[in-house]
Image (cartoon, rainbow, N blue to C red):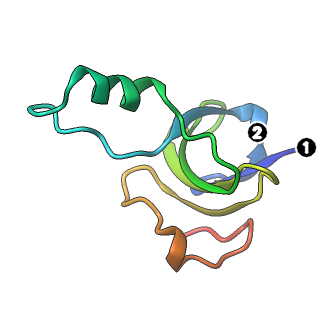
Amino acid sequence: MFLVPCPHCGPRNASEFRWCGEVKPRPDSNRATPEQWRDYLYLKSNGAGWITETWYHREGCGRYFRTERHTLTNKIRVTVDGGKPEPAIAETGAGASGRR
């Protein structure tokens, strides 16, 4: 079973959540080319290692939040409320239950 630590409800089965994708910088809407928008909307880095991503707790509190998850092990080291700034990977050293 894969547990996702919701910052509001605590650890829950991953089936309660919807994965919303990687967090990446949004292009400037006044200057972005169609290619930059395509890259932002459709291309994912899909790298092996730690990524910051957004999740939605659809069967619980109904809130969005961000996590840092290792793509090979599914270990989650940080979860933060969706309204707060994204976690800084270099600054965190918490374990899978290390919530902010």
- Write the residue at 8% across / 32% down: 30
Disc 1 element: loop
Q: Quadrant of the C terminus?
A: bottom right
Residue 58 drawn above or below residue 78: above
Q: Nearer the viewer, residue 46 or 60?
A: 46
Q: Quadrant of residue 26?
A: top left
Sequence-wise first label, 1 or 2: 1
- Write the residue at 49% across / 29% down: 43
Give coordinates of residue 54: x percent, y percent: 52, 43
Give coordinates of residue 88: x percent, y percent: 46, 69
- Write the residue at 33% across / 46% down: 25
Q: Residue furthest right?
A: 1
Q: Is residue 29 left or right of residue 93?
A: left
Give coordinates of residue 40: x percent, y percent: 37, 32
* Residue linked to disc 1: 1
Q: Nearer the viewer, residue 6 or 70?
A: 70
Q: Residues within 10 Å of mark 2 (few under 14, many from 20)?
A: some
* Residue linked to disc 2: 14
Disc 2 element: helix
Give coordinates of residue 98: x percent, y percent: 66, 71
Disc 2 marks a residue whose amino acid type is Ala
Are the residues at dot 1 and dot 2 in contact (C-beta closer than 8 Å)?
yes
Q: Is residue 9 left or right of residue 2?
A: left
Q: Quadrant of the N terminus?
A: top right
Residue 49 drawn above or below residue 45: below
Looking at the image, how many numbered discs can be counted on the residues?
A: 2
Q: Is residue 76 left or right of residue 35?
A: right
Q: CA distance from mark 1 to mark 2?
A: 8 Å
Disc 1 marks a residue whose amino acid type is Met
